[in-house]
Image (tube, helix red, strand yellow):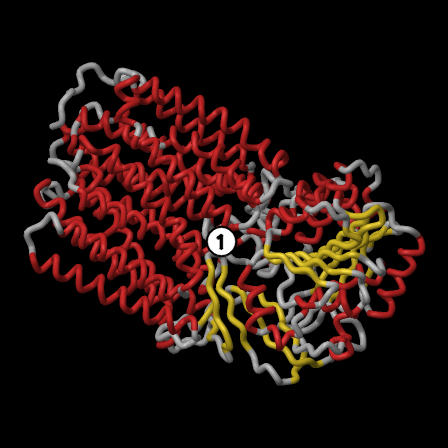
Amino acid sequence: MMATKSVYAGLFVIALATLMYEILITRIFSVTTWYHFAFLAISLAMLGMTAGAIIVYLSPHRFISEKTNYYAAISALSFGLVSIIAVLLHVITPSFLPIGDARTLMVSSLIIAVPLLLAAFICSGVCISLTLTRFPEQLHKLYATDLIGAALGCIMVVLSLQVLDGITDVFFIGSLGCLSAVCFSIGTKERWLKLSTIIATSLLAIFVCVNGYLYQHEKQLFRLSWSKGEHESNVLYERWNCFSRIVVQGVPDQWRPLEEFGLGKGVDKAIARYVKLNMDGYAATPIYKFDGKFSDLEFLQHDLSALAHHVKKNANVLVIGVGGNKDIIAALAMNQESVTGVEINDNIIKIVNGTFGDYGGHIDKSPRVELFNDEARSFITRSNKKYDIILASLVDTWAASSSGAYALTENSLYTVDGWKIFIDHLTDQGILSMSRWYNRHVPAEIYRLVVVASEALKQTGVQNPLDHIVLVRHMTTVAWQPDGLGTILVKKSPFTPQELDGIEKICRDEGFELVLSPRGAVDPNLKLAASGATEQLADNVPFDMSAATDDRPFFFQNLSLKHIFDPRVYEEARNANNVMSAVALLMSMVAVTFFSFYCVRLPFLMTKDKSVLKGTTPLFVYFFAVGVGFMLIEMSQIQRFSILLGHPIYAISVTLFTLLLATGVGSLLFGSLWAAVKEKPRTILLILLAVAGASALVAPLLAPAFSAAATPVRIAVAVVSLFPLGMVLGLAFPLGMKLAFRQSSKVAPWLWGINGAASVCGSVMATLVSMFVGISASYWLGFVFYLVALLAVAKPPEDSPRVVT
């Protein structure tokens, strides 16, 4: 039985739609719940695909070869429709639940959505499993089609979210699922199926066009109306892209109290006109009404985050994360010579200086201001300028980017490697200013910030880092506000006595607290952090106090395995905010391990004819090892190349697209290579290990070597370095299937399911290993799993059947 062109087309489209859906769900969950729940979407996708493959294996009498197109069409159509229903139920749940508690609303909406989301991915899993296991002679070409379709899905979700909102994009993906069903239905005789799929595709496509047009005019028929369990009110504007959803809320001309957290004495009761630009429902920044009169916003000069402007006058300032232009206005108000603003989210720049440009005073048109849409670290590395002040105030989103829940774009800003770059781009008397939340009980984030500063200074040649560090805090007593704000100043040269006197005076005048300086520390833990005594600090604080590096860039994840059972970590909910996501991942690892075990155990128990399993144990080991190994290598490469590429859109689209495309090309070339090596699996796997080992040695060198190159050059470097790795990784699956069909075609769907279950384990494992050990360790662990795969099939049983049964 041979696959027709319509089968290839159907597989291509369903693979494209499935990956788009997986990525889009991470984006939607990041808005409606929290970024660590976004990881659930990846697990659901893989679990569903695995379950679909096992269903095909356990129902051989239903899924007969002659009915392949029929059931592929039915499952693709089901995916298209169920995927829409699942998301609609998730987003409308809070509208009809009589519950006021935000967390209860979030949990309720997830409980309702998860089974249907899983069902959608199961339908996709059935479709893909059927296609990949019913045409053994064309397997490598079909697998290549699957991977290339998925690769294009990475690009399509980025492009579609430039013109559609998240909810309309779900309908677009649903229409693609139905289009896949149209392709498969061509190979069937059922006219009703052909007609149904065409009608469903057409209706959904029409809706996407209409609602997409209305979205551009803020009049869409369906829109997300709540976030993090809270209903949104006074929404003035909404825009999505692949790593954020932004809404602008408020009453533009209403004078009201400020929502600032670092205002000094005398201005803490000030009022102003502003609207709130909110990213993913939790990271908010104000857009102040500004008509060119700095006196109306004079309070910004008394904000703790503006402390560096008091120390360094007539400065050339670089602002990281311009948000609503607050930090730029503060710098201009204090007569700084020039301000360069770098904002990673192009939608923020378009909204603040375009749609709300007149409201915010068009700061972008000031002759002293330059704005750039770029990732700040990459921008600074490429810059030939030296800055008197580099400032970043509360640059975080608590949002998942499209590549996964722990690929937070801000992490590269808070590593020793990043701070070395910042310090190198300061003038001799320049200051790096960073503001973060200051927890009243255990300010773990602040401690770690000081540790990073100390280590970065040491690596730039500073003998006594404490002479170069000042930390000031402002604590609040308002119940709804965070405990406080801390601003660290890191000076390239030692602080002078005159500068320290001036800072102390500002603190007295504004009511701030100087908690760390060359003259002393109010908290002994801060002195330990500044001196680099991290081991002693870790004994006092039950959190991870190591300096974040590019190999472990997860600054905001401060759970320490050493203290995972220490009750102090969980005593205060506000202390545990940064660790609960890691705990959730650890629990996920336990859950997916249990699931993976039963993906092997249950089909084994339900297999009546155990003779088909004779000699298949090496194949089970092989497919499990390849599944885990692939995810470990893939995710570690995505994390590593995020540093080189900088902008998350590039990191997501270039890295994932290149790997999937190259894997597809490798699968496509498998047939020729298989013949060239005279059907020796060991030779192919040795080639794979050799290329993977070389890539592991080369990849860490690329970011330092090319970080200052232009964006097109860095993209080219990433593509060239990733493509050979992707090609050899693409050889493993068709090789395993070739060996499986020699043994018994009946177990092929099960092996595909085992590979999927292993991928679930691998995705969680990759994140955990990178977080707690490092990205390099995650990659090399993947290498070890491929070595296990080699050992599993190096010597196939000589008495195994050599024909398809």
Residue at x-position 82% and y-position 55%: 522
For the C terminus, which image quadrant?
top left
- Name the residue beneath numbered marker 1: 401
Residue 543 visible in image:
no
Q: Local crowd at mark 1 within 10 Å, few (<14), some, or many (≥20)?
A: many
Residue lying at the far bottom of the rendered structure:
254
The answer to whether 769 appears left or right of 421 in the picture is left
Which residue is nearer to you in this view: 104 or 713? 713
Which residue is nearer to you in this view: 796 or 523? 796
For the N terminus, which image quadrant?
top left
Residue 299 visible in image:
yes
Residue 341: image quadrant is bottom right
Which residue is nearer to you in this view: 118 or 660? 660
Position of 776 relative to 518 (above/below): above
Position of 411 relative to 136 (above/below): below
The answer to whether 741 appears left or right of 263 in the picture is left
Q: For the residue labelled by badge 1, is the local secondary structure a helix, a strand or a loop?
A: loop
Provide residue 134's location: percent of width, then percent of height.
16, 37
Give the residue type at disc 1. Ser
Residue at x-position 58% and y-position 74%: 356
